Image (cartoon, rainbow, N blue to C red):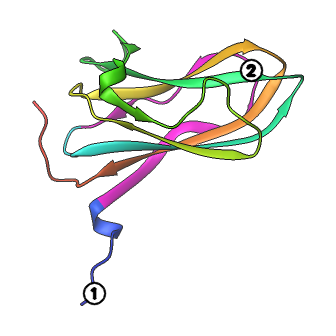
Amino acid sequence: MRKGLFHNFKAIPAIASGSKSDAADGIEIDRKGSQGILFAINAGAVTGSGDFGVTVQESDESGSGYADAAADDVISGVPATLAANSAYQVEYIGKKRFVRLAITKAGGTSIQLGAVAILGHQHIQLP
């Protein structure tokens, strides 16, 4: 039997796809049981000179205590302002159990945006 990547990764929504007109928090991701997390971000049309970005946030507790992750805990190719019709990836390598993306807005009208969290190697137990 051939084995591929299917059983090594789990994809779950991180930001529901759609038109975003304000800063907002993404969906909380519980990293328990996974070795790593990578976010795949898809930006579509930008209207009204939209100036939107994303940051990675972390917490020890579910639902509260979120703060921006330290630069040393994030591997990112995401610019401060997302470009229309682009895809980006950002990896969180910190130790916090709960992670999410946060949408930032510096100006403009709206952006079409969505993101998926890809949890890797579903066998590691976090404290």
Mark in front: 1 vs 2: 2
- Please name the amino acid that badge 1 sits on: Arg
Q: Is residue 18 visible?
A: no
- Please name the amino acid that badge 2 sits on: Asp
Q: Which residue, given by chain and number where applicable, does mark 2 sit on?
A: 51
Magenta stretch: dominant SS? strand
Q: Position of residue 23 (x, y in %)?
A: 64, 16
Q: Specify whether residue 13 is painted magenta.
A: yes
52 relative position to 68: left or right: right
Start-end of magenta stretch: 9-31
Do the numbered discs 1 and 2 sit on residues whose CB atoms are within 8 Å? no
Q: Position of residue 104 (x, y in %)?
A: 62, 17
Q: Secondary structure at mark 2?
A: strand
Residue 2: mark: 1
Q: How many marks?
A: 2
Which residue is most to the bottom?
1
Label 2 CA crowd tier, 10 Å (few <14, some 14–19, many 20+)? some
Q: Nearer the viewer, residue 49 or 127?
A: 49
Q: Secondary structure at mark 1?
A: loop
Q: Nearer the viewer, residue 4 or 87?
A: 87
